[in-house]
Amino acid sequence: MLPDLLRPGLNVVFCGTAVATASAERGHYYSGRGNKFWQLLHESGFTPTRLTPEADASLPAYGIGMTDLVKDVAQSHDRGLDYGGANEVAGHLISAAPQWVAFNGLTAGRAAAKQLGIALPKEVTLGEQPWTIGPSRVFVVPNSSGAHATMPYYEKHRWWTQFRQVTL
């Protein structure tokens, strides 16, 4: 389990499904070799330089936080996860009250919407959502994981850049 990187005053909190095995073993968010999170974060304009997973604790200085829907499971895929803790995570997000919550992938966005009773999973698509989590607006970006490689990188980059533009 990785600690949440949450505090009041953040611009955006990225929320994934669960910590992948590689990240759990290394003790840092998005540590898997095939994960493009850090590249997308930088190239879309959220950070002035490309950070490494080992620099994840510095993200709040950039106005960025991190959390996951599932806190007690570390695995490399999203199948079979118990999203029952989404209400607790939502409580932490409401307390932190970031401007935006960005779900890293449709699976995370749909699971949160379903567990929180906000929207039907099929209603959740990429982009800005018509619902909020407390005062926070919600956006779903394409999953940065290499395991979700059905979308070309340039298209993921386009969505992440679009998200960055709405957060300015």
Image (cartoon, rainbow, N blue to C red):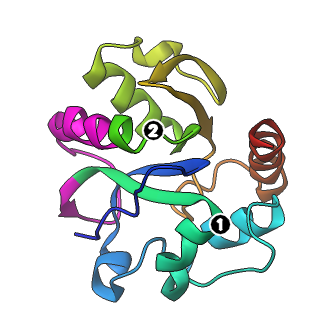
Quadrant of res 107: top left
Residue at 54 percent across and 84 percent down: it is: 55
**122 relative to 30, above or below:** above
Residue at 36 percent across and 79 percent down: it is: 22
Quadrant of res 167: top right
Q: Which residue is mark 2?
A: 97
SS category of the residue bearing label 1? helix
Q: Quadrant of the C terminus?
A: top right
- Label 1 sits on what residue type? Tyr
Is tag 2's residue or tag 1's residue first in the polypeptide sequence? Answer: 1
Residue 120 in the magenta stretch? The answer is no
- Label 2 sits on what residue type? Ala
Residue 89 in the magenta stretch? The answer is yes
Residue at 38 percent across and 55 percent down: it is: 67
Disc marking residue 62: 1
Task: Give the percent coordinates (x, y) of residue 11.
Answer: 62, 48
The magenta span reads 71-92
